[in-house]
Amino acid sequence: MPRNSLNRADVDVRLAPLADVDARIAARFRRTATARQPVHTCYVPAGRVDAGTVRNWGDEALAALDEHAPSAADLAGIVDVSERRATEILPRVRAKLQRSPVEDLRIDFEDGYGAPGDEVEDADAERTAGVVAEWLRQGTAPGNFGLRVKSFDDPELRARSVRTLDVFLTELLARHGELPEGFLLTFPKVVDVRQVEAFVEVLELVERTLGLASGSLRFEIQVETTQSIVDAEGRLALPRFIGAGRDRISGLHFGTYDYTAGCGLTAAHQHLAHRACDFARHVMQVSAAGTGIFLSDGSTNVLPVGEAEQVRRGWRTHYGLVRRSLEHGFYQGWDLHPAQLVTRYAAVFAEFRESAEPEAARLAAYVSATGGAVLDEPATARALAASFVRALDNGATDAEEVARMTGISESELRELGRV
């Protein structure tokens, strides 16, 4: 037995206080998301949501694709992708737009909707609940959907925000019978942790009143104010927001234009690639790391509409920004127009396929423990597997192709890639 000098009891006394640290870390961090993260969110003003909204987005995207990029050569000539890669991704983009064009949709009762008056908003809340119930009945609902309610930052709109949620959920439950899976709320323009606390209390009241399970109403915080990054006391705000959410927060969504305007940037410099936005996104990342909370990037208002060159410009801009978001670890973003679905999926698929072969080799080497040119840590192996899982879920690849590349079955890959 080796000799030592310290008394075990003395050591235990000094280490004992770390048990509290372990408990706090386990409660807040070291969590994995159980749901699949969509690659985008579409925001549609409530007054324009109807039974055909989801299919119409797909049809409009397909029409734009057929008109402006019907071949791989056409697509490669517009966005930064080789013709060889475009040949791989174009059929997958088309299939995605035909099969499930919208992965996440918010019925927007905030900026995109305005304040048309209580009577109109009540009617739209009730009507759109019926639309969602019909989607669910027909099996055509997106995998994720919900409402963006009005901000609590405006004293005159808080009660209206709650009433809209009340009317919508009351009608949805009456028609559908239960809260559907994938239902989420978006809470915009947060400037103080007490607004999050109040929203959570409202959700608790709604759950008790409507007979919903405690904690079933979950929400995303839109990070679109400077006060949601640094609070009035000079502290990072998001960790306190997340704590106040009491495990209800599912995502942090960046808001490009409100945030950059709040930073004092002129219109010419209000865009996703500005370094001011990078700072906000970095704060979002470190605040959400290990919590299981999804991150979503913001939008671009350069839309692919109008004359052919305007469409191409809109696609080039959107494609480049989506690729930039993916490079920075933001696997979801906002889409404001149906034609943006073309470059959303083109960028997501191209990002995966350009890195798939070397990543597959690294993953196969890790699983077989044969080593290789890169010695990966378990955390990196999980990230590699998670990339393939995302690609399987969004249509960038399929189980047969992944098994051929990695030698790993889909079930094994999903187990390794739990994130």
Image (tube, grey):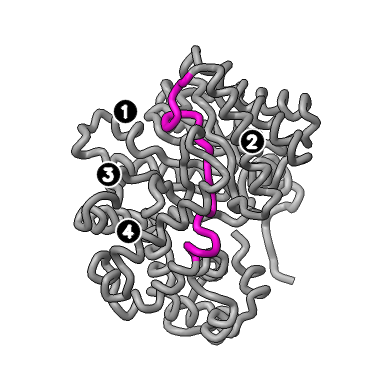
Q: Are marks 2 and 1 in contact (CB under 8 Å)?
A: no
Q: Secondary structure beneath disc 2? A: helix
- Residue 9, percent across and down? 76, 48
Magenta segment includes 109: yes
Q: Which residues are magenta?
A: 96-116
Q: Which amino acid, by three-letter code, is at mark 2?
A: Ala
- Residue 76, percent across and down? 27, 71
Q: Which amino acid, by three-letter code, is at mark 3?
A: Arg
Q: Which amino acid, by three-letter code, is at mark 1?
A: Gly
Residue 58 or residue 303, whichever sits in front: 58
Disc 1 crowd, CA 10 A, few/some/many (<14, 14-19, 20+): few
Distance from disc 3 to disc 2, alpha carbons, whole Å, reads 40 Å
- Residue 296, percent across and down? 46, 47
Q: Residue beneath label 2, please?
A: 129
Identify the mark nearer the N-term, 3 or 2: 2
Distance from disc 4 to disc 2, alpha carbons, whole Å, reads 33 Å
Magenta segment includes 4: no
Determine if residue 346 is in view: yes
Q: Residue beneath label 3, please?
A: 275
On the image, which quarter does residue 174 sit in?
Answer: top right
Q: Residue at x 49, y 65 (%)?
A: 96
Query: Which quadrant is home to the C terminus?
Result: bottom right
Q: Residue beneath label 4, please?
A: 319
- Residue 44, percent across and down? 47, 40
Task: Give the label, 3 or 1, closer to the camera.
Answer: 1
Disc 2 crowd, CA 10 A, few/some/many (<14, 14-19, 20+): many
Q: Residue beneath label 1, please?
A: 262
Q: Which amino acid, by three-letter code, is at mark 4?
A: Tyr
Residue 415 or residue 301, whichever sits in front: 301
